[in-house]
Amino acid sequence: MARYVVGRLGRALITMFIVLSIVFMLMRLLPVETYYGARSDTMSDAVKEQILRNLGLLDPMPKQLARFWSETLRGNLGRSIVLRVGQENTSIIGPKAVYSFRFGIASLAISLIIGLSMGVLMAANKGKYIDRLGNTYILLINALPAAVYYLFIQLYITQLFKIPMLYDARNPVTWILPTVSMSLGGIASNSMWMRRYMVDQLNQDYIRLAMAKGMSSRQVAFRHILRNAFIPMSQSLPTSLLFTISGSLYIESLYSIPGMGGLLITAIQRQDNTLVQAMVLLYSALSVTGMLLGDLLMMVVDPRIKLVKEGGVR
Amino acid sequence: MGSSRQDKFQQLSDGFLALSEEEAERVSSYSDELFRPAEFDTEAAEKAGYSNYSYWGSTLRLFLSNKVSVFLLVFLAALLVFTFVQPYLPNQLHPNTIYQDPETGIHYRNVKPNAKFWFGTNNIGQDLWSRIWSGTRTSLFIGLCVALVTNVVGITLGSIWGYARKWDKLFTEIYNLFDNIPYTVLRMLITFIMRPSLFTMIFVMCLTGWIRMAKYIRNQILIYRDREYNLASRCLGTPALRIVVKNIMPQLVSVIMLQTALCIPDAIGSEVFLTYIGLGLPVSIPSLGNLINEGRLVMLVPAQRYQLFFPVIVVSIITVSFYALGNAFADASDPRNHRR
């Protein structure tokens, strides 16, 4: 087990190194004109060159990459060039992550609780009215572009209940719609997955045995199926938890929530390259860490999983 | 506890015996006239061992038995034909022309739907009806291109990945690298770097699409690769390509069809999103994403909301139909559903 943990950790570090280097090099493909900032029209060529030199963009690639890594390891992700000129990117992102985290964690909880119980309910009433209703919901959420129904929820529900359209930190009523909208997709995917899992498991031998022993279907559902259902879920849970701080790109921008997702969109729209780079790096790092934790958690909750190959393959 | 269970068992077996006795009595009461020895029929004897099962026949029969999906198929086909025929119909306006009043020279801005502009005009005076169909063409073109590339690249590389063991490690590492940048972020980043255009749009969607397809095909091939019939084929010297194409691929038709059908809603959805964040196609190329975004900008004026409604209705119909149709076809083409 220790061997696996160390190996997995090493692989995660290598992945992190390669992914972050790739992102950094991709950002270097951007035309240099996008680094001049807002007042590029009035700048002389000397000033422009000075800007590029200060950012280190005129150095050869290996040197840039080496500097990038030494800076990143010290926790320095560069300074913003458009949105808040000269401010350190980490200090811009930090406070935003708090907002995103609050919304993210609330919607994660909602989508897990409602999604999973909806899935169980649908499987228990398979083929009946409630199942068909749930399936229609899943179909609509999956098929329609998220951008469309988020927009309509914002437009009509705020009008219906006479609540403000945009997020307001001092008015808790405005916190509800973004959280609910954020959970819609999660509810659909969780319930779809849970329903399929329940239906598959109901045909398994161990469930038949439990039924034959005379357990009620409620006992079977909670004691056997639900417990087993958490094993595949444990792999994706850390990623979902970590990504709560990155926020929802679309919702945050739609409701003007001062979170990370909205910030990334603003940074892209305003071409704040260094900020975009810092945020994409952060997203990738979160993702690598989430997958690492997911694999480790999976190993803890499911003792059947064989981690180290024993003997040869077939 | 033990005794009550035994009682229950006794009751059950009594009931069972009683039933069979009753049955036996009934059977013995039948007269012999009802029974006739069967004549020997050569044709019937040779029929044994022949199954008239045909994969595509069963798929088609199962698919046609679902009324809703047949309706959706006909409807989508009609919609597709109409999308391409529309510019050649009489009285059609041009999607990018800004229309003016011939007498006063004033632009027809935000004109509500009427006899000339069937869906009204947008805020600079372009005809919404023709823009919507032109946009549908663009969006479907993007979707179909993405579906084609994703399928060809994904299936080819996925087969190699799954079938050739020595490549497995390399491909898995590449997959892990891709998988570690969230797809939305990757799409945004690449579009941001490459500058928005029709090619960029198709490129970024293929970039994230093929790897998912390849992974799926790889997992499926791993399941079927070492089945006994493939082992037998290999022992008989069948080349790997033939095993993959003839023995394994037919098992995957349903999955591939489903993925293809889902490519289109997915492409439209991410086009709408990319347009929203300012990385969409230029306004001179109408697309459903562009139109929804234009509608969003005027949605706060209730009188102009038709500019949002029309594209949204078209998008919803197309995406929901493709999604439902893909699922229906995947169900019908899954050989496990063919056992009747």
Image (cartoon, grey):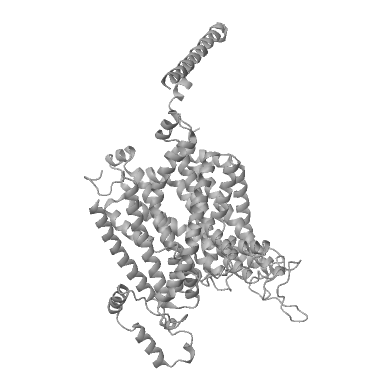
Left or right: residue B257 compared with residue B132: left
Residue A61 lies, in percent from the top left, at 30, 78
**Residue lying furthest right in this view?**
B103
Q: Nearer the viewer, residue A182 or A268?
A: A182
Q: Nearer the viewer, residue B217 or B190?
A: B190
Query: Looking at the image, which residue is at 40% across and 82% down?
Result: A32
Residue B155 in view (yes/no) = no
In this rendering, the answer to whether B248 lies above or below B27 is below
In this rendering, the answer to whether A284 lies above or below B101 is above
Q: Nearer the viewer, residue A107 or B174?
A: A107
Residue A252 lies, in percent from the top left, at 52, 67
In this rendering, the answer to whether A279 lies above or below A311 is below
Query: Looking at the image, which residue is at 31% across and 46% down?
Result: A305
Residue A274 lies, in percent from the top left, at 40, 77
Quarter in which the N terminus of chain B is drawn: top left
Left or right: residue B271 compared with residue B186: right
Q: Nearer the viewer, residue B286 or B51?
A: B286
Residue A243 lies, in percent from the top left, at 43, 62
How many numbered marks are there? 0
Residue A288 in view (yes/no) = yes
In this rendering, the answer to whether B138 lies above or below A135 is below
Left or right: residue A36 compared with residue A4: right
